[in-house]
């Protein structure tokens, strides 16, 4: 079952604090709901063989439990809205290529890091 796979407990929920999009208050509410979440997921079996079916079943689960697992449902909506892509990394390398040409390859790492941070955050450099 889904509950067996995720082995959810208060410690696992606490580990989600690394996601800056989840507030401390939301993490605390999730910790108080973790037993209810495990109970709700205990009888759920979802196959991962078909991505579309898996996605549909996960959404069905959250639609069915959005009123009794308020904190987990809120966190799920936040996490499902995240776009897993490499656009920010690609932007950094593109900025590096524009800012530092071939004859600046031996520039100090601190200069590279500081200049990149300023440019990435849209602050003027130099």
Image (cartoon, rainbow, N blue to C red):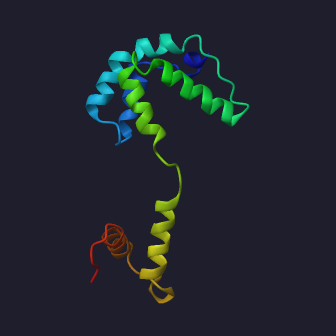
Task: Check the image and name the residue furthest to the bottom.
Answer: 103
- The quarter of the rendered structure image containing the N terminus is top right
- The quarter of the rendered structure image containing the C terminus is bottom left
Side (left or right) of 101 relative to 121: right
Residue shown at 42% from the left, 12% from the top: 36
Q: Is residue 33 above or below residue 113?
A: above
Residue shown at 34% from the left, 76% from the top: 111
Quarter of image, res 120: bottom left
Quarter of image, res 123: bottom left
Q: Position of residue 47 (x, y in %)?
A: 69, 25
Q: Is residue 80 above or below residue 9?
A: below
Q: Position of residue 55 (x, y in %)?
A: 61, 33
Q: Position of residue 87 (x, y in %)?
A: 50, 61
Side (left or right) of 101 relative to 120: right
For the residue pair 57 and 12, the one nearer the viewer reads as 57
Residue shown at 49% from the left, 24% from the top: 62
Q: Position of residue 75 (x, y in %)?
A: 40, 31
Q: Is residue 119 above or below residue 50?
A: below
Task: Check the image and name the residue furthest to the right.
Answer: 49
């Amino acid at each position: 079952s889904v509950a067996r796979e995720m082995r959810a407990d208060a410690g696992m929920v606490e580990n989600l604090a690394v996601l800056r999009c989840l507030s401390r208050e939301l993490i605390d509410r999730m910790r108080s709901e973790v037993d209810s979440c495990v109970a709700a997921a205990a009888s759920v079996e979802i196959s991962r063989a078909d991505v579309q079916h898996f996605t549909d079943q996960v959404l069905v689960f959250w639609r069915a439990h959005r009123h009794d697992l308020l904190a987990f449902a809120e966190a799920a909506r936040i996490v499902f809205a995240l776009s897993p892509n490499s656009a920010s990394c690609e932007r950094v390398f593109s900025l590096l290529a524009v800012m530092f040409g071939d004859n600046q390859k031996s520039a100090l790492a601190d200069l590279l890091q500081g200049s990149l941070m300023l440019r990435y955050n849209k602050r003027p450099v130099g």
